[in-house]
Image: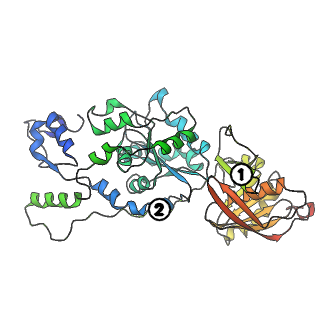
Amino acid sequence: MFGLGPEWILTAEGVPIADAMVFSHPEQIGRLAESCPAAVPTAVLAGDPCFDRILAARHHRDRYRRALGVRPGQRLVLLNSTWNPTSLFGDSGPEDVLPLLLPRLTSELPADEYRVAAVLHPNVWHGHGPGQIRLWLDRARRAGLALVDPLEGWRQALIAADVVLGDFGSVSYYAAACGTPVLLGATDPGALGAESPVAAFVRSAPRLDPYGALPPQLDKLLAEHLPLDGPATLTSSVPGRSAALLRGLFYRMIGITEPAAPAVLDPLPLPPYEPPLRTAPLRVLTRTTADGTIAVLRFAEPRYEPDDAEGESHLAVHEDTLDPGVLESADVILRYGEADDPRFGSPHAWAAEVLDRYRSASLAVYVTGPRECEVLHRDGLRCRLTSDTAGDPAVHASALLARLHTGPAKAPAPSTLTVRTGTRLARVRVTVAREGTGRAARPGR
């Protein structure tokens, strides 16, 4: 058994190397007794400080979600991989799931209904180097994938997650112990002790179909999820007590009196705010319902549009997209920034410049905050969109474009819009700064 065999924990003379070996559950000590009986006297039951820090911070879940840029109504899908050739981020040759999965995670899951983040084992970063990791994941990051700090941020991301898509590593097991639905994209029974709790979990956890559509699999997982008893009870037999047990062990070993103050663990820090920044082209589908609500679906650089997609389609592109040639065919061009950024003069000046340069674009959108954006239409309409809820105002600009292009000719701009993304409704006020007056009002005329 890896890590518990005599070759790992005994000297050449058969004496235990360690004075104490810490375990989180008696089940582990039982496996030690089977693999290396000589080391059993050194075994100490002292819980799991990592798991205890997770348990102690669960009430901060909403804060962690906001830090990752997860908006109300969105699902956070956490991709994770351990360090192994057969892991999700391994190299399984023709059986490797990740190259197929990565582009589909960001192109099949609607951008306004899902946030996708990835946690990779520290050895993945160390073995390949941060530059190589970011290069491999560059396309996914431009489509909205967040890369989580492998040392300080993964526990917070795990607490924030709605779904974990992983492998046979410890992050998947911790997720199951917390009651979070887990979908396994890579399994390798040979990498685990057959009788270990992790192996039992891997045998029973739902499997990802890498060739099946992703949204139905996630919907099914969430609808049918029942927390597993094994991970919750076998991760630690003394949850919440590891700090006291470990400190008691350490002071006994050094032979001095333990302090009277309570033993505590460092709380998990609040991660830095990391909102999604998608510079990949967005395929936008809009549909107006009978009550006038405009439903918007956005997909980052999709390989194909959903089979059941209805309504009109247009292309929205961030000005800093990787391939500037895509801007030549964009219907909407986006930028996010402060309204008074001197580099752009003003949102209106930037918009007029963009529409003059890219003649196929109908709308230029400068997003100034989570509720507001400035919009300029090629026919001269200039307005501000203000939502009653925080989100990505670029969605509301796409809804306005749909209304303008499907409404009666020469009709004035609407004063309000009701926009639906997934199950979330936003009511948007349209404040007109200048109405269009035809070709003479167009930028560049």
Displayed quadrant of residue 123: top left
- The percent coordinates of residue 2 (x first, y second) are 24, 36
- The percent coordinates of residue 435 (x first, y second) are 86, 68
Per the image, the residue denoted by label 1 is 316
SS type, badge 1: strand
* Residue beneath the point at 42% across and 52% down: 158
Q: Which mark is residue 163?
A: none
Compared with residue 36, is residue 119 higher up or lower down, i.e. above or below? Answer: below
Question: Quick one: label 1, few (<14), some, or many (20+) residues within 10 Å?
Answer: many
Task: Give the distance between the C-alpha atoms of the residues marked 1 and 2, in whole angstroms.
Answer: 30 Å
SS type, badge 2: helix
Q: Is residue 276 left or right of residue 86?
A: right
Compared with residue 44, is residue 57 higher up or lower down, i.e. above or below? Answer: below
Q: Nearer the viewer, residue 273 or 248?
A: 248
Q: Please tell me whether mark 1 or mark 2 is closer to you in this view.
A: 2
Compared with residue 62, is residue 163 higher up or lower down, i.e. above or below? Answer: above
Q: How many numbered markers are drawn?
A: 2
| Residue furthest top in the image | 94
Q: How is the image coloured?
A: rainbow
Look at the image and tell me in which quarter the C terminus lies: bottom right
- The percent coordinates of residue 173 (x first, y second) are 35, 44
Given the image, on which type of amino acid does mark 2 rest? Asp
Look at the image and tell me in which quarter the N terminus lies: top left
Question: Quick one: label 2, few (<14), some, or many (20+) residues within 10 Å?
Answer: some
Q: Is residue 442 left or right of residue 196?
A: right
Given the image, on which type of amino acid does mark 1 rest? Ala
Q: Nearer the viewer, residue 260 or 325?
A: 260
Per the image, the residue denoted by label 2 is 62
Q: Nearer the viewer, residue 202 or 347?
A: 202
* Residue beneath the point at 56% across and 43% down: 105
Q: Is residue 251 left or right of residue 412?
A: left
Looking at the image, tell me whether mark 1 or mark 2 is earlier in sequence order: 2
